[in-house]
Amino acid sequence: MSGTNLEVLSLFSGAMGLDLGLERAGLSIAAAVECNKSAVETIKLNRPDLPLFAERVEDITTKDLLRKAGLRRGGTFVVSGGPSCQAFSTAGQRGSFEDPRGELFREFVRIVDEARPRFFIMENVRGLLSAAIRHRPLNKRGPGHPPLAPDEELGSALRVVVEDLRTLGYYVKFDVLNAADFGVPQDRRRLVFLGSRDGEPIRMPTPTHAEGGAGGLTPWTTLSQALATTGFDPDYYDFSPGKLKYLRRVPAGGNWRDLPKDEQAAALGKAHESWGGRSGFFRRLDWDKPSPTLNTRPDSKATSLCHPTEVRPLTVGEYAQIQQFPSDWHFAGSVREKYRQLGNAVPLGLGEAVGGVLAELALRRRQADPSRCGVVECDNLDLLARLANRPLTIYNPPRMRGSDGATLSAWRDGRQIMRTDFRGYAPVADRKALEDLIASRRRKTPVVDELAVAAE
């Protein structure tokens, strides 16, 4: 790419997983912004000469950021980043936009608007697709409780995000990408938004791998392939004795469901009376499959990532291998802080795939199309159909909710409907195909869609 300037302003840089992936695609990190102390030290350890703002994104000006990077407004190739996603994640308390972290995407939008890069990359958890602006606890839904407000409906947060992105005047594409489809040894699904200032024909990267080698593609990379080399950080934060007691009896690829029936309730505690798959409880990994999504607490009962044959969590080094960090990349902080940086990082293979799409455009004659600007689209019609057919909310099962004699349908009828029209996100040429797909799905027995569960 000689003679091509592909500078990136990296926001919410973390341990620089996305950045290293973009560099593998030929892009160059011009400056980074990160406020977590351990992540800042990691960046300094590995990139001591990189212009770095060790402070919150909301506390910096775009003018200062551009000056420190040696760039000008409109001259930056990409602004990239993943605004803090805990507010939309399935783990912990879901605050959505009530949580200040849920507002950080607006800081990302602010800098894009003020820097006017040629492209932007924004990634987040897929739970954002079905998150509500205001989260209502499950035990406060249904008969006996006030009707849902529009901002409590599933999908209302995405409506806000899309409208904010639309105001930028960029041509935007979005989709859920699985890192395993791009050679990463991890089944990790992320929501990715790509934006083009000039309406260039952006697209999502084409998968190179598939489960079982479907479609003639390369089979997914397995855990055994990922951990074939040695020499990475061997530290780990061990399971407590109480967890080890159960994990010793879970086979490779199994979880709490493989324990004797009469011990499952004691193993799960209060979670035994909840619902959902709870697949992370006392989970042991499988050599012959990709790792599930790496989290920040592999030693937790609910998010266990136990080694396939040893009774211990994955080590920090094994995390780094699965995330595809180079062996000479050093992580600062305690073992707990290293897990947090790695669990929050974007796998390098996914970053490289996304960056490669934009690098390819940089090598072509620019095809600007102002008519596309302000349009937000998704080419994945299957995803749009699922979103269109998704319920407005989900409920605890009958055994977990009280009833005053009213039905759920009567309760639902008591509120306004503000359902986002996901048909409007399909490219115009695909609208008819999407309508047919939505109709075919509605004729089937309704089930709780996994995207709705992901938001909860």
Image: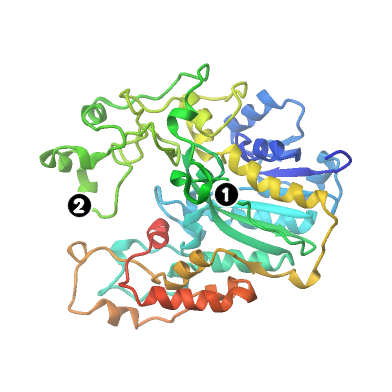
Q: How is the image coloured?
A: rainbow
Image coordinates of residue 316 in percent, x first then y, are: 48, 26
Can you see residue 157? yes
- Dot 1: few (<14), some (14–19), or many (≥20) neighbours within 10 Å? some
Disc 2 target residue: 273
- Dot 2: few (<14), some (14–19), or many (≥20) neighbours within 10 Å? few
Which residue ends up furthest to the front in the rendered image?
216
Query: Is label 2 in contact with label 1 (beta carbons under 8 Å)?
Result: no
Image coordinates of residue 314 in percent, x first then y, are: 41, 28
Question: Which amino acid type is shown beneath numbered disc 1?
Answer: Pro
Image coordinates of residue 69 in percent, x first then y, are: 81, 40
Question: Which amino acid type is shown beneath numbered disc 2?
Answer: Glu
Image coordinates of residue 145 in percent, x first then y, are: 29, 73
Indicate the secondary structure of the residue bearing disc 1: loop
Determine whether 246 is above or below 95 in the image: above
Task: Describe residue 181's horizontal placement relative to residue 363 as left or right.
Answer: left
Along the line of sight, the residue nearer the viewer: 287 or 354: 287
Query: Which of the 4 quarters of the picture holds residue 153?
Result: bottom left
Which residue ends up furthest to the right in the rendered image?
3
Q: Could you tell me which residue is drawn at 30 percent across and 47 percent down?
A: 278
Which residue ends up furthest to the top in the rendered image?
231
